[in-house]
Structures are given as structure tokens and as C-alpha cells.
Amino acid sequence: MKPHYVQVRPEDNVAIIVNPEGLPAGTAFDSGLSLNEAVPHANKVALLDISSGQPIRRYGAVIGYAERDIPAGTWVREDLVRMPEAPSLESLALATEVPAPPEPLEGYTFEGFRNRDGSVGTKNILGLATTVQCVAPTVEHAIARIRTELLPRYSNVDDVISVSHAYGCGVAIDAPDAAIPIRSIGRLARHPNLGGEPLVVSLGCEKMQPDRLLPQSQLVNASKGLPPVLELQPYVMRLQDEELRGFGSMVEAIMRFAERRLTELDARRRVTCPAADLVVGVQCGGSDALSGVTANPTVGFAADLLVRAGASVMFSEVTEIRDAVHLLTPRCATEDIARDLIREMRWYDDYLARGKADRSANTTPGNKRGGLANIVEKALGSVAKSGTMALTDVISHGEKVRSKGLTFAATPAGDFVCGTQQLAAGMNLHIFTTGRGTPYGLAMAPVIKVSSNTALAERWYDLIDLDAGRIASGEATIEQVGWELFRLMLDVASGRKKVWTDHWGLHNALSPFNPGPVT
Amino acid sequence: MKPHYVQVRPEDNVAIIVNPEGLPAGTAFDSGLSLNEAVPHANKVALLDISSGQPIRRYGAVIGYAERDIPAGTWVREDLVRMPEAPSLESLALATEVPAPPEPLEGYTFEGFRNRDGSVGTKNILGLATTVQCVAPTVEHAIARIRTELLPRYSNVDDVISVSHAYGCGVAIDAPDAAIPIRSIGRLARHPNLGGEPLVVSLGCEKMQPDRLLPQSQLVNASKGLPPVLELQPYVMRLQDEELRGFGSMVEAIMRFAERRLTELDARRRVTCPAADLVVGVQCGGSDALSGVTANPTVGFAADLLVRAGASVMFSEVTEIRDAVHLLTPRCATEDIARDLIREMRWYDDYLARGKADRSANTTPGNKRGGLANIVEKALGSVAKSGTMALTDVISHGEKVRSKGLTFAATPAGDFVCGTQQLAAGMNLHIFTTGRGTPYGLAMAPVIKVSSNTALAERWYDLIDLDAGRIASGEATIEQVGWELFRLMLDVASGRKKVWTDHWGLHNALSPFNPGPVT
């Protein structure tokens, strides 16, 4: 591959080196630029002389100011870039550049499991939700037996999993912030891929009592037999029930409880659903400087296709859009939606300040080695995942997506927390871009992993589902890879294709967001 | 069983009903008292008429004030008890009633695995520590293969586990409170039952880089072979290393890495160690009103025996001792130790206040159904676990126990968080009392479960290791059951007896305390 850099916008004064091994000092480009020092892969080079204090531009936006004079051909390392202030939340343009309604995209479908509440599952999983971590090992013990003794008889059921978490007791259950983990876990229990109607295992003495989690749930005495039809509502059993004598009887009760629901789940079949029934969550993790040039714009293109097809698309990660919020508030469909977005930014600013941190805590050592100087540069690349459509809704932490189109679902930015919270919001398909590489996966919904660079896709050939790195080398366009991704989504959602993390069974622990204190 | 109540101190004006089914209205006791309403098991009855506003006394201390006139024979429910203010931290007596040094208890030993750092393991486990949740499923995948393919060849190794957690990235790693989870996880990785010298799996781009976790660790390229002797120091491998091509090679590398350490662990043998090498953490969970009368004083008696034998004993759970701190500061060996204890109380008061909560958030629905009116009553019963010896050290969240004798190790009070933090402090044996019952267990150290009432011990015959409920019925004394517990500890620590949670493999997820924000 000959020396190659990617300049995103004509007004940018830095560009990204895309040669996988980086380039040595003295390298000359067709443009006439030559490197006056070695620049690693995915790192930035100055295209022009930039004087001390002058803006450094990428994505057509200011990612920082030069700490000293930076001659053309210099490696623009993190320490040469002074981070700008976060955009003030007081003077943002609200709904001033709302994109026109898109041309509808019709005729795309997938095969899914339709639930009674109208949601659609992309998997057919028996989920055993838990009210508290105390019961999780007991439920896991039962699940190991269900997997070997029961599941083979129910071939239409994909898996059996526990919805377990570190919450439920030892927490300030009435503190204002407790509402977030409680509603998040309640939503996880009712996830579309679990059929929407949970079975819940409770201990009995925990703070998060089942009626806090699922007010409509019905307590059953699992040692005495179950109602004839379970599907009418969520059911709860309690390990401290006096009728359960010994651990063996607890496990037996959970298995009886599970077998009844397995019978119901097994009777379901995939039916043809419009692409509009997809609820897609997009996320990036282990990003590098190419993420914003290849993988994230590809996801943005596919997000536009989904919105045109009438689907729900959510993007998230408050600290990664905080510094690009001035690009989003004009795109909001109404001023109220823009104000909701600002409210979520402010809430998180306050939350971080309480912990004596700010949004600069976001970038990781890997981001920096990957060429991202700071959260501003990361945010500008991250927001590309949202595509170009109008932002038509904003939901808060642990709330459920309530509309078609593009939603901002507030979540933290850490991969496993964001993924958990997007599941809580009802995501039935997950798109995850990465530059550095991570074997992250979710049990509850398929995770399609898109690499920002071909070197990663080649090295991790059995973990990366789609390579967007071909865009940097000019082998493919964003549009081409975007359509590939869209078609792959329909295949994966239909169960026709299996993502790598499901192939290997790589499923991260659920990590519901708990901003409140533990006691 | 004839009608029976337990009055802890002569000056108490309430007592606890110990009949397992509770007692109906009209029940007459030998003392002449008769019930003017039904009182459930483990709940309180007024022994005398208590006028509105007058103190209600249990354990010889004020647990609250009467909300209205309470005639003798009345069920003293939560809503009749107005909670007192927490003891002020400004005017506590410091080291004013230091117990005399105890008579040494000699000749008690157990069989343990001695580590190079001087610590002693009660198990011999291969632990694979992780720097971030992202790698946990990969490590679990490898562990499943190690269990079936390798472990059977190493019969002196008890188990292979991952030290996984929800921390490591997506957190404000430089925020002041981040020190707590970082040092906690570093300590967990070096736990005595894992041989004290960890193998660590890192992703590569995470915020909690291996050198933050274990500054002395050495990075190895697991795809190229390992140093000839691993035991010299902790070793780290990184999934993003460029030499690792594909998921299969990651798993193979972890397995090679693990096999080398299995060989070393397998060569170890149990040796006779003085009881002084025990580091015992005591905890209560799912407490009822009998916990403070039976199980906790039994643990306190055994704690005294341990201190006399030269062992380290830690008690914890800040919010459960906050309201009894005035009973502890006089017992501190020096004024400095008392001030350290006050510092931990103050830190937690502030932490809860930041989250708009206070220590009253501690009690659970189960505590209340179990007859505990509030955190004051719970704390007075909880602190009985600490026995009667001088308090000779106070350590903060995630610090390691550094001395023999009785230590207060600051932790939250939630079972799985407290257990995790006590493991981080170096606990090699865990004593857990319960009244309501919980199947809680830990993979890293044995958990001896002591029931506060016989009804639970009978119902959960295959989960409770020792029944202290016999004390309430007069069948046994605290001293008798305390000695039983002490001997059981030596048997369990030696591997001669297996606790029930290890029999069933019931091991809760590690939940390191993270008071800081996620990003």
C-alpha cells in the first residue's frame, strides 16, 4: 500500500495515516506533503503549518488548539493539542436545521418472534430474571441443569439465561437515583428477546422487592404447582418461601417453573416482520482515529437506511456526544426534544462533578494510542454513528424506546454499561464498532461487530463480523459497506446468520447503571 | 415448645418471641406477662407499659422512642418506634474502656497452603484476574476448557476461577474515589487462596492498565512462550497483542499460561499452621431480631477465641455499626485507632449524603418482617459479632488487614459487596450469620453459614452449616456453640470439611465497591 492519509473535510488542517504499519520520517505523499517524523497508524499528521494557539481542525470542527508551533508533516500527538471547553449548554441552537423527512425505504423484512406486547424478538430465549445478586448462583446452578436436561427437548428455544446483576440489596433503594437501576432491570426482565413476560426469582428479604421491579407481577408458590397458563403475566417465585425445604427443592422449583415457560416459548415460530420492527442500538468501543472515518460513518449510513425503513435506531454514550452536542441540537425535530437532550447532558455533567470528574475522563489509553487526542476528537467521530436524520426523541437512563426514527438514549459510555442500558431500552439488535478490538458480546441480543481498520479484521478474523477498514484504503465506499451492514442486520435478526460472539458464547455480564450509593 | 421470649439485659423493656410460629393474643408467659395481640416469631413484645415518648430499650441501649403509649404485652412494630439520631461523631469517648489483653489460647492449628508472601491459603485455586469486564467472557470460555481439559490432571488444585468485575473501563480512573476499586481489585488478584501471585488477562486499551492494578507485574507475550519460572512475580497477558491472531489463539494462550501455573500450584501441599494464620471476616445478612441474640454473639465468642489464638479477625459494614459507634470507640486500643474509626464513619456519612441517602437506607423489608425496627436495633445486634476484645486496627475500603487481633475493615454492608471487600482485605475464611436465609457464597474463600434460628436451619438443612438457634430455645449456650464454630473453622480452613455453598458451587459474582462515577 502506498503512503496514504484521509482528510475528512477540505478545511481540516490534520489528516489520518491509514497505512497499517504507520509511516517513517521522510515519507512523501502525492499531495507534496512529507513527514518530518514517523507517524503511527491511525494517528494525525499536520497538513499545514499550524501556529501556536491556532485551531486544529478535523471533521471540519475544532478539536483543540496548538500547544506550540506545529510544522506541516508533524505527528500531532495528544500533548500538542490543548482541549477546548465543552460547548456551553446555555446558548445552543434548538431545532434550527431539522433534516427533511426522508424518502421511505420499503420492502425490507426480517423473520422475528412477535410478542404479545407488540415488540419483536430476534432471539427466543428463556430468561430467568433476578431481584438481587444473592439468588444469582442458585439460578445459575438451575440454568446449568436446564441447559443439559431440558433445553435439548425444546429446539425452538435458543438459550436460557439469567438476568443477573449486582443490584437489589445493600443499596439506598429510596434515594432519587435508585429509579434508574430499578427501571433498567425491570426493562431487562421484560426484554423482547425473552418473550417480554418474565419469570423472576426473588430471595424474599431483599430491598428490590418484586413489586418494585414489576408492579404487575404475580407471586406463585413454585413448590405447589403453577397456574395453567403462564403467559398472562410475569411470575415471581421466592427462595425464602416456607414451602421450599432445602436447596434441592429450590432448584427443582426453578426447573418446573422454567419448563412450563419453555413449552410456551417452544411453540413460537419466526414470522415475517417489516424492518420497522427492529430496535437497533449503535455503540463504539476501543475506538481509534479511523473509527470516525470508516466504521462510524458506515453505521451512520445504515442508521439512515433503518430510519427510512421505519425502524427505531438509538445512539447513546452521553460523555461521547457531550462535546458534539452543538451538532445535535440543531438536528432535533423540535425545540422540546433539543431541550430534553440538553437536560441529559446537564444531568451527566452534574453526576460527574459530584464524583469530582468531568467528560475528559472518557478517553482511554487505547484511544490515545489509537490516535485520538481527546474527548472532543472522539465525540466528533462517535456522533457519526447517528447518521444524518432528524433526532426525533430523547429518553433518559433505563427508559424504553417509544418511537420509530432516531432516538438519543442516555447511557454511560463504557461498553458493557451502555450495552446493558440499550438492552433495557428494548434493543433487539446491536451494532458495535471498534478500532483496537474487543471480544465484548451480549447474551440477550446479537452484537454485529464492525472494525474500523482492516488490520484488526484480519487479525481477529473470527471475532469481527464486518470490515469497514476497506473504506480507508479506497477498496469500498461508505455507501457500499453501509448497505452490506444493513443486509447483514436483517440476516442476523432473522437468525439466518450468527454473529461471532454468539458462535463462541462470549457474553458480558449485565452492568445496569447505578448512579446512587450503596449502603 | 412452651411460650418463650428472650430478654437480653435486665434493663430492657422489650423482648423477642422465639417460638417459631409466633404466639397468639392471650398467650401467658411464666413471668406473668400476657400478649394483648399476636406477635410473630423474632418480633418484639413490650415487657412493661411504655409511655409515649419514653425510650424503648434492647441490648441495654435505646433503640428508639415510643410513638404512642405501648401497654405491656403489645407487639412493638416498626411504626411504634421513633428512630433516635445517630450518635454524634464529635463527642465520642476515645479508648476509655480498653479491654485488658486476653489470655492467650495456644495449641490450635489448621492445615493450609503457605504462600511466599507469608500469607496462608485455605484453598489452592488457580485465579485468572482481569483488568476489565471486556475480557471476562473470553477468560470464562478458557476456564471452561481448563476445567475439563487440564484441571483433572492437577489433583492438588481445588478450582480455577476468574477474578472478574464490572470495573476497568468506562470509569473516571483518575477521580479521587477510583483508588478504592483499583486497590480492591489489585488485592483480590493477589488473594492468599490464589497463591498470592496472580496471572492477569488484560485487553490492552482499557483504562485500568495492568501497571495501575499491579505495579510490579510483568507483561508476557503469551503467544511466544513464557519465562521458565512464573512464581517470581505476577504476569500479565494482553488480548490485543498483535501476535495473537484470532479468538482461538487467545484461548490457547490463556490455557498455556494457566497450565504453567497449575504445575506450580499442584506441587504445593498443606502444612500445619497456627490458628494465628487465619484471617477471618465476619458478616451478617438477611438478619432478624434473633441474629443479635443467638448467631451474632456466637460469632463474637468465636472471634474472641480467634483473637486469643493470635489470628486476625475483621468485622465490617459501616452503616451497620454507625449507630453503635459509641460502643466501639471506647474499646479502641488507642485514641488514634478510635479517630480512624470515626474517620471511616464520617467518610461514609458524606458518601451517602452525596447520593441523598443516609444510614436509615440500610434496613431491608426482610429485616423488618424479621422484627428489626430500624438500623439502630440492627446495629446493636450486628456489633455483637465483634466480640469483646480491644479494637486494635481500622483499615479503609480495599486495604489489606495488617495486624493480628480485631480489625474494623470499612466496607459497605450489602452481602456480596462486603464479602468482596473482605476478600480484598485478605480474608481466608468467612463467617456469615443469617436469620431470613440466603444462599450467598464466595468462590475465593469458604463461607461458614450460621443460622440465628432453628426453623431456618431445619428448612435449609443443606445450606446452613451451623445452627445457633439452639441458643434461643435454651438447648445450648453461646459458649458451647461458639466453641463448635471455632472448631468448625479449623476443619473448614484445613479442607477437612466442605461448606454447603462449596458443595453446591454457589458463588456470588465479585462486586468491588466503586463509590466513583462511571463515564
Image: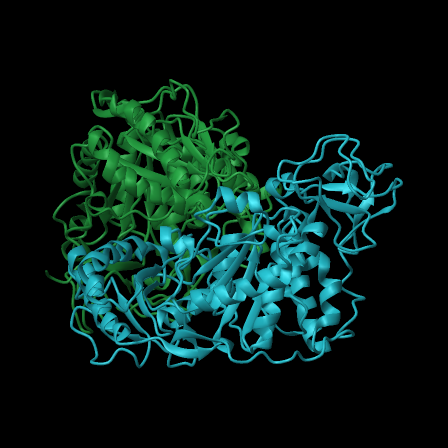
Chain colours: A cyan, B green
Q: Is residue B373 left or right of residue A363?
A: left
Q: Is residue B424 visible?
A: no
The answer to which image quadrant residue B152 occupies is: top left
Of residue B259 and residue A388, the one placed in the foreground of this image is A388
Vertical position of residue A64 compared to residue A489: above or below? above
Q: Residue at x 57, y 61 (%)?
A: A411
The answer to which image quadrant residue B224 occupies is: top left
Q: Is residue A5 left or right of residue B475?
A: right
Q: Residue at x 78, y 55 (%)?
A: A9
Q: Is residue A106 visible?
A: yes
Q: Quadrant of the N terminus of chain B?
A: bottom left
Q: Residue furthest right?
A: A51
Q: Residue at x 16, y 67 (%)?
A: B28
Of residue B464 and residue B132, the one placed in the foreground of this image is B132
Q: Position of residue B385 (x, y in %)?
A: 32, 42
Q: Residue furthest left?
A: B1
Q: Residue at x 87, y 45 (%)?
A: A54
Q: Position of residue B489 (x, y in %)?
A: 22, 34
The answer to which image quadrant residue A428 occupies is: bottom left
Q: Position of residue B421 (x, y in %)?
A: 42, 41
User: How many labels sit on residues?
Assistant: 0
Q: Is residue B95 left or right of residue A256?
A: right
Of residue A55 and residue A93, the one placed in the foreground of this image is A55
Vertical position of residue A309 compared to residue A415: above or below? below
Of residue A429 and residue B197, the one placed in the foreground of this image is A429
Vertical position of residue B462 compared to residue B190: above or below? below
Q: Position of residue A97 (x, y in %)?
A: 77, 73
